[in-house]
């Protein structure tokens, strides 16, 4: 190297005696002058220190990262895993993950992490998991003092006697604290020897309102025969049963299997339509069990989830009623139809079927409809709007049907159902509407009667007159619970004679002298009381002794009389109209009417 290429400043930094030709130091100076220069150079010192810190940090990370502290836990946030502790292999189980917020703050940023054992096949969950594996759930905010729940369904298989651990880990933050916490719990399910297995299989996607077929198959994997088996299906809301092979034994969802031989398999093909919101999951559950003394005892269960996809043509049945009707009501129906496809539809046909013994089908009002018994049909020949329906085009049809004012049958828990379908030249397979169901609510009746028994007639100041008051209670088509009759007695407590007929009602009828209230606590009141079975009746005595201020007046014997109860079919409270007062003229007694109803 030519020494002349170094400037004076650079040259001064090299040790004395250093030669640009050989790059060496004179003897005796090696490692001495260079060290002195090193400690005189701050840049080299700090650079070296920084490098050593970086190397140490990397070393510490890899050495101690496995010992990192876990997220903290809180004793006030609990998680429980509930499910079967025993299960026959290759069968389905439900696990309920319940988490509870006992903190004084909301839980935010909640996620659930699931750990499944080998042999577990995830099927579905409520709410829906983030992924198809069902291992992660993003959950909403949980208010303080509240519980949350995730239900997981899956098939579990394994060796006999093997314990399968289901673990749940909840990650969360407190709304008033930034750190992440966790709670963890697990449950072990022991595998039993298999005897029966069952599956529900069908298409992943089903078209809204169009028939689809799914199969329930079950196998006896044991070495013994099974007798008196039954399969019971639970359908999702919006499912309409069409047919099955073999036909159902009862209620379109129960099939009796007299015998299933060892190592034999049987199946049921069910056809029906699913209706609901697009992309909605519809869950079908099948239970397999034995009939013991005509009582179904489920043993194993299986489920299948179907995703509803939109149809090209849609029909919706709506009513103005709030899920129930009363005798004498008129039901107003609205049919909404729409072309949801990309092509025009021609010659549409809409059919509606009405079912329910309480309907007065002779007075249906349906313009442009062809009415045949309980079937109503609209087509392009009667309604021009159905000739052509362009893409995105919609339409409406309105009609009414009255409910009978009285019942001629002793059938209780009656439902009025409207089912319907729509098709066109281009879509020959009918698309069904979700059924419209209205429950017939019961009607509670209360009559108050009175009779003169003894004493002054007409009533006289300072003299006593004894009356017998009677409550008569009736009920129509549904059983009632918590049935109660209340009344006020606007008289002196001495007027109550505590004479009650019949004896069977003495424990149910009471009078409170402090409040002046009479309570007839009936409880359960059967359907058709007072129509097909005798009305319920109770009588009690009231003694009236008028004073001078009552002269020339009627005497109010009872006030605010009302009967209440809960319709067990509709699950709604019902009541009679309030009877504000019952006077000596209201009881319409022959003796009092003849001699006078006012105080003399």
Image: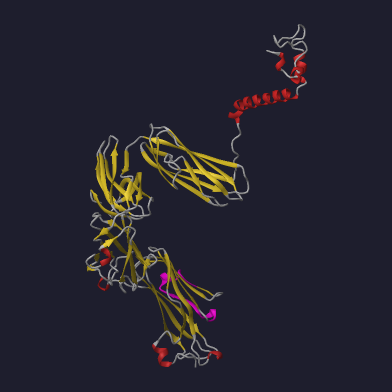
Q: Residue 278: x, y in percent?
A: 37, 52
Image-quadrant location for residue 574: bottom left
Q: Residue 569: x, y in percent?
A: 37, 63
Vertical arrangement, residue 43 with respect to residue 478, above or below:
above
Residue nearer the viewer, 284 or 431: 431
Image-quadrant location for residue 591: bottom left
Quadrant in which the N terminus is drawn: top right
Would you say residue 505 sits in the magenta stretch? Answer: yes
**Is residue 119 left or right of 7 when viewed as pictured?**
left
Residue 182 shows in the view: yes
Q: Residue at 71% of width from left, 24% of height from top?
A: 49
Name, please, the residue furthest toward the top: 27
Residue nearer the viewer, 307 or 588: 307
**Is residue 468 left or right of 232 when viewed as pictured?**
right
Magenta residues, start to end:
491-510
Residue 249 shows in the view: no
Q: Residue 166: x, y in percent?
A: 46, 38
**Is residue 353 left or right of 582 when viewed as pictured?**
left
Vertical arrangement, residue 335 with respect to residue 122, above or below:
below
Residue nearer the viewer, 541 or 485: 485
Q: Residue at 44% of width from left, 86% of height from top?
A: 454
Image-quadrant location for residue 470: bottom left
Q: Residue at 52% of width from left, 91% of height from top?
A: 461
């Amino acid at each position: 190297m030519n020494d002349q290429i170094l400037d004076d400043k650079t040259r001064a930094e090299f040790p004395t005696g250093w030669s640009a030709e050989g790059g060496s130091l004179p003897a005796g100076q090696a490692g001495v002058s260079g060290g002195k220069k090193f400690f005189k150079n701050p840049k080299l010192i700090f650079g070296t220190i920084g490098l050593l810190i970086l190397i140490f940090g990397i070393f510490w990370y890899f050495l101690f990262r496995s010992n990192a502290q876990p997220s903290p836990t809180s004793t006030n946030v609990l998680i429980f895993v509930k499910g079967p502790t025993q299960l026959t292999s290759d069968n389905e189980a439900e696990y309920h993950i319940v988490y509870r917020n006992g903190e004084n703050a909301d839980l935010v940023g909640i996620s659930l992490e699931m750990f499944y054992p080998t042999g577990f096949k995830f099927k579905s969950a409520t709410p829906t998991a983030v992924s198809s594996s069902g291992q992660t759930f993003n959950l909403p905010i949980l208010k303080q003092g509240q519980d949350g729940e995730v239900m997981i369904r899956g098939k579990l298989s394994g060796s006999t006697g093997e314990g399968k651990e289901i673990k749940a880990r909840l990650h969360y933050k407190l709304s008033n604290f930034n750190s992440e916490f966790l709670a963890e719990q697990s449950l072990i399910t022991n595998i039993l020897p298999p005897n029966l297995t069952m599956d529900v299989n069908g298409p992943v996607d089903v078209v809204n309102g169009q028939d689809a077929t799914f199969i329930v198959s079950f196998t006896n994997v044991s070495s013994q025969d099974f007798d008196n088996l039954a399969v019971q299906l639970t359908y999702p809301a919006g499912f309409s049963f069409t047919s099955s092979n073999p036909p159902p034994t009862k209620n379109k969802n129960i099939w009796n299997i007299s015998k299933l031989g060892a190592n034999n398999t049987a199946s049921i093909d069910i056809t029906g339509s699913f209706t609901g919101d697009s992309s909605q999951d519809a869950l079908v559950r099948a239970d397999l069990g034995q009939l013991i003394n005509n009582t179904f005892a489920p043993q194993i269960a299986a489920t299948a989830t179907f995703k509803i996809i939109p149809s090209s043509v849609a029909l919706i049945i709506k009513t103005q009623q709030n899920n129930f009707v009363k005798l004498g009501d008129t039901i107003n129906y609205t049919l909404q139809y729409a072309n949801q496809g990309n092509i025009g539809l021609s010659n549409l046909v809409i059919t509606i079927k009405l079912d329910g013994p309480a309907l007065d089908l002779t007075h249906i009002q349906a313009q442009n409809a062809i009415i045949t018994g309980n079937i109503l049909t609209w087509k392009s020949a009667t309604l021009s709007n159905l000739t052509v329906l362009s893409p995105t085009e919609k339409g409406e049809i309105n009609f009414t049907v009255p409910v009978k004012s009285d019942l001629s049958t002793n059938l209780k828990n009656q439902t009025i159902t409207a089912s319907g379908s729509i098709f066109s030249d281009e879509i020959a397979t009918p698309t069904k509407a979700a059924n419209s169901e209205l429950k017939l609510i019961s009607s509670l009746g209360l009559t108050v009667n009175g009779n003169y028994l003894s004493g002054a007639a007409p009533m006289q100041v300072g003299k006593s007159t004894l009356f017998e008051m009677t409550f008569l209670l009736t009920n129509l088509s549904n059983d009632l619970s918590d049935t109660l009759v209340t009344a006020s007695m606007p008289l002196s407590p001495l007027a109550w004679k505590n004479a009650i007929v019949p004896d069977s009602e003495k424990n149910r009828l009471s009078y409170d002298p402090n409040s002046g209230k009479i309570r007839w606590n009936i409880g359960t009141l059967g359907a058709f009381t007072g129509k097909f079975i005798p009305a319920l009746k109770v009588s009690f005595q009231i003694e009236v002794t008028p004073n001078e201020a009552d002269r020339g007046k009627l005497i109010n014997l009872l006030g605010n009389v009302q009967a209440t109860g809960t319709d067990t079919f509709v699950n709604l409270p019902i009541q009679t109209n309030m009877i504000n007062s019952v006077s000596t003229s209201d009881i319409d007694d022959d003796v009092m009417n003849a001699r006078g109803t006012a105080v003399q």
